[in-house]
Image: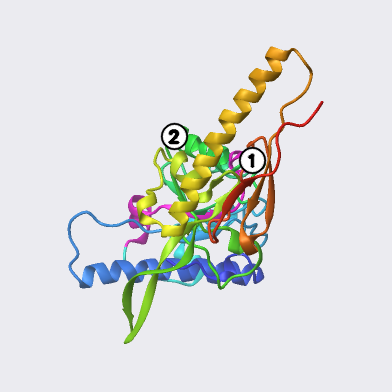
């Protein structure tokens, strides 16, 4: 169910309108199920809130998302207080088929104290999940942050899990909102689709770089999987192969350098400097192969610049 913007704006009237909108839409969905004679296992419902404060909410307005959820809970139990008379037993459906949800860019370390500690006490039988999760600037790094949030889901029986946001870059957005996608679009068309009578190309995917890896690789590893290179753009596959080969060579060179220094008993530190030639993508210096920042959207070649530096 779509959450109206008045969930966090508009004062007390906006909060009432938000709650009435959701419970009436919920009631309408139950009506539609009855009209269509839906049987068998029935789907769950949710209204996904932003991770924002609701200062006009009656309770918990000082904690993100919780104020809206508590207000909605009250509306489900007391719809008449919001100027609505349900046609169905929305309270029973709420008790048995509802899941709370929210979107957030906050890191896992924030959520335990600002959300889950209170949530478990407030809603001991209603599960919750994060509909859009991606902490872009997590101090611990993406892989560790994902590990923490997934560990939290394993510990907390009410916390179902997360949906990582997002699959592809939203090129129509601006600023930090363009940093969320795991894949960018390459230039190579791999299929064609009909869009209301217009033939459009479906372009291949190229992983968005993330440090020495990519966003897609970090997410896949956090969930115990891997990225299938066969499904990527041809140039992206080549770049990933070159990057892996380079790191392997650099690792071997570093080991040899460390061994030579130890044998000589000197204090010199082996330092290998490489230059990444990436056309219009810019120049990067790699020290001892320790860091590789690969731009997967353009062609790349690697060329050594120098050998070991002195002490």
Asked whether 189 or 159 is in front, the reply is 189
Asked whether 270 or 12 is in front, the reply is 270
Q: Residue at x 68, y 50 (%)?
A: 284
Dot 1: what SS?
A: loop
Q: Residue at x 41, y 52 (%)?
A: 99
Asked whether 34 or 128 is in front, the reply is 128
Q: Is residue 38 left or right of residue 119?
A: left
Residue named by callout 2: 154
Distance of label 2 from label 1 (alpha carbons): 32 Å
- Asked whether the viewer can see residue 87, the reply is no
Q: Is residue 299 magenta?
A: no
Q: Is residue 16 left or right of residue 286?
A: left
Circle nearer the viewer, 2 or 1: 1
**Circles 2, 1 touching at the beta carbon (< 8 Å):** no
Residue named by callout 1: 291
When the figure is inspected, residue 186 is found, relative to residue 291, above or below; the finding is: below
Q: Position of residue 58 (x, y in %)?
A: 62, 57
The crowd level at tag 2 (other Cα within 10 Å; few <14, some 14-19, many 20+) is: few
Dot 2: what SS?
A: helix
Q: Is residue 287 left or right of residue 72?
A: right
Q: Is residue 107 magenta?
A: yes
Q: Is residue 191 left or right of residue 36?
A: right
Looking at the rendering, the stretch of residues picked out in magenta corresponds to 89-113
Asked whether 219 or 187 is in front, the reply is 187
As drawn, the residue found furthest toward the right would be: 311
Q: Position of residue 293 (x, y in %)?
A: 61, 48
As drawn, the residue found furthest toward the bottom would be: 197
Q: Residue at x 44, y 71 (%)?
A: 84
The crowd level at tag 1 (other Cα within 10 Å; few <14, some 14-19, many 20+) is: some
């Amino acid at each position: 169910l779509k959450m109206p913007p008045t969930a966090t704006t508009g004062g007390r009237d906006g909060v009432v309108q938000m709650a009435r909108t959701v419970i009436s839409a919920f009631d309408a969905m139950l009506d539609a199920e009855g009209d269509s004679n839906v049987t068998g296992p029935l789907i769950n419902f949710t209204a996904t809130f932003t991770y924002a404060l609701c200062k006009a909410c009656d309770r918990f307005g000082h904690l993100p998302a919780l104020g809206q959820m508590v207000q909605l809970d009250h509306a489900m139990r007391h719809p008449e207080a919001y100027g609505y008379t349900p046609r169905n037993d929305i309270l029973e459906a709420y008790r048995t088929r509802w899941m709370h949800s929210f979107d957030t860019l906050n890191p896992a370390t924030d959520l335990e104290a600002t959300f889950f500690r209170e949530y478990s006490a407030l809603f001991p039988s209603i599960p919750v999940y994060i509909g859009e999760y991606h902490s872009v600037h997590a101090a611990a790094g993406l892989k560790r942050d994902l590990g923490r949030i997934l560990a939290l889901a394993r510990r907390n029986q009410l916390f179902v899990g997360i949906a990582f946001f997002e699959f592809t870059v939203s090129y129509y957005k601006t600023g930090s909102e363009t940093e969320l996608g795991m894949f960018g679009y390459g230039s190579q068309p791999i299929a064609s689709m009909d869009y209301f009578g217009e033939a459009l190309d479906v372009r291949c995917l190229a992983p968005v770089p993330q440090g020495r890896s990519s966003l897609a690789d970090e997410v896949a590893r956090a969930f115990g999987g891997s990225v299938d290179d066969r499904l990527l753009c041809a140039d992206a596959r080549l770049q990933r192969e070159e990057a892996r080969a380079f790191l392997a060579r650099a690792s071997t060179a570093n080991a040899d350098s460390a061994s030579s220094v130890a044998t000589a008993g000197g204090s010199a530190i082996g330092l290998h400097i490489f230059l990444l030639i990436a056309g219009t993508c810019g120049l990067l210096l790699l020290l001892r192969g320790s860091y590789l920042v690969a731009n997967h959207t353009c062609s790349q070649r690697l060329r050594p610049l120098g050998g070991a530096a002195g002490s």
